Image: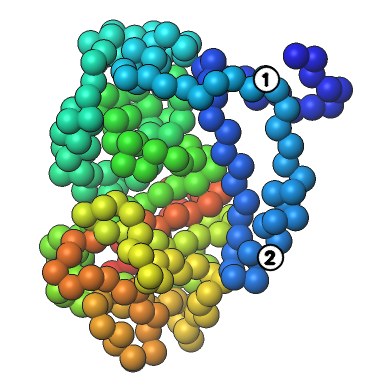
């Protein structure tokens, strides 16, 4: 295919690349801007029949330029089943709290990147929990699975966290998103995100967020959770200076 003059070329290591077009919105008012942007997106190329494969690992080996570091591991996993995936996913969920300190470091960049842990066989599989993400020079994801007493977060207990409205080390923007630890997804029908565009700082330059099953109605920002269910939240910092980011948002 001839590349138009001035076009940006993104090379793919796969015969069947996935394309994700991300449109950043900051508040509900921005949603009206999405359709006009989407209308400008055009895809041209050959149309092939839908892909089917009973063995995704074998398919990957056949249609991707696999990194040499991964080849032996993938070859040993040919025949990987749904049950295998669930087993590995459960294991990653159990060890996920240990990534609270390092966040997404080494998870979403290429295996030969300069990020620490980029070729670590423990860190890289953990990316399946959140399989779409940026390397840390774009964004840093800080997950929290425990409260300030290192107890696993659970909807039966009210938790309060304090976040700086203008966090040091963040050039662009930030967000706080809560997820169910059972589904690793947001909770349907409930607010799941706070950021600088739907909050206002207090006199100390902070926002206070209460995680609870019932609305505290105390002037803090309420993040609903389900009673009796474990959950976690992720603080995302975009265009970060990782060494300057805030510590765990505990109430002092």
SS at mark 1 in the image: loop
- Residue 32's label in the rendered image is 2
Residue 239 vs residue 107: left or right?
right
> Which residue lies at the image location 47% right of the left edge and 22% below the top edge?
51
Q: Nearer the viewer, mark 1 or mark 2?
A: 1
Label 2 environment density (alpha carbons within 10 Å; few <14, some 14–19, many ≥20)? few
Residue 88 in view: no
238 or 197: which is nearer to us? 197
Label 1 environment density (alpha carbons within 10 Å; few <14, some 14–19, many ≥20)? few
Q: Is residue 147 above or below residue 70?
A: below
Image quadrant assignment for residue 152 = bottom left
Counting from the top left corner in percent of width and height, residue 63 is at 47, 12
Q: Quadrant of the C terminus?
A: bottom left
147 or 66: which is nearer to us? 66
> Which residue lies at the image location 42% right of the left edge and 8% below the top edge?
62
- Residue 46's label in the rendered image is 1
Residue 132 in view: yes
**Coloration mode:** rainbow
Q: Quadrant of the N terminus?
A: top right
Counting from the top left corner in percent of width and height, residue 19 is at 58, 33
Counting from the top left corner in percent of width and height, residue 56 is at 34, 20
- Residue 125's label in the rendered image is none
Pointers 1 and 2 in contact (C-beta within 8 Å): no
> Which residue lies at the image location 54% right of the left edge and 15% below the top edge?
15
Q: Please report whichever mark, 1 or 2, sits nearer to the chain's N-terminal start.
A: 2
In three-dimensional space, the C-alpha distance between marks 1 and 2, rounded to whole angstroms, equals 32 Å
Counting from the top left corner in percent of width and height, residue 165 is at 49, 71
Q: Residue furthest bottom?
A: 218
């Amino acid at each position: 295919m001839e590349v138009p003059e001035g076009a940006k070329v993104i090379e793919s290591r796969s015969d069947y690349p996935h394309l994700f077009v991300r449109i950043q919105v900051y508040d509900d008012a921005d949603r009206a801007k999405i359709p006009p942007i989407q209308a400008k997106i055009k895809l041209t190329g050959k149309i092939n029949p839908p892909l089917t494969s009973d063995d995704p690992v074998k398919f990957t080996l056949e249609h991707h330029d696999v990194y040499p570091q991964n080849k032996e591991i993938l070859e040993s996993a040919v025949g990987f089943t749904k049950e295998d995936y669930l087993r590995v996913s459960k294991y990653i969920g159990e060890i996920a709290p240990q990534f609270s300190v390092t966040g997404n470091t080494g998870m979403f960049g290429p295996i030969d990147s300069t990020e620490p842990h980029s070729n670590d066989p423990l860190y890289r599989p953990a990316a399946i929990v959140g399989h779409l993400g940026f390397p840390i020079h774009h964004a840093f994801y800080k997950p929290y699975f425990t409260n300030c007493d290192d107890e696993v977060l659970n909807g039966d207990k009210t938790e309060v966290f304090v976040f700086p409205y203008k966090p040091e080390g963040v050039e662009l923007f930030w967000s706080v998103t809560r997820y169910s630890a059972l589904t690793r997804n947001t909770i349907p029908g409930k607010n799941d995100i706070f950021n600088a565009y739907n909050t206002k700082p207090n006199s100390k330059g902070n926002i206070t967020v209460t995680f609870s099953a019932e609305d505290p109605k105390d002037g803090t920002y309420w993040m609903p959770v389900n009673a009796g269910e474990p959950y976690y939240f992720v603080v995302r910092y975009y265009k970060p200076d990782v060494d300057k980011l805030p510590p765990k948002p505990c109430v002092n």
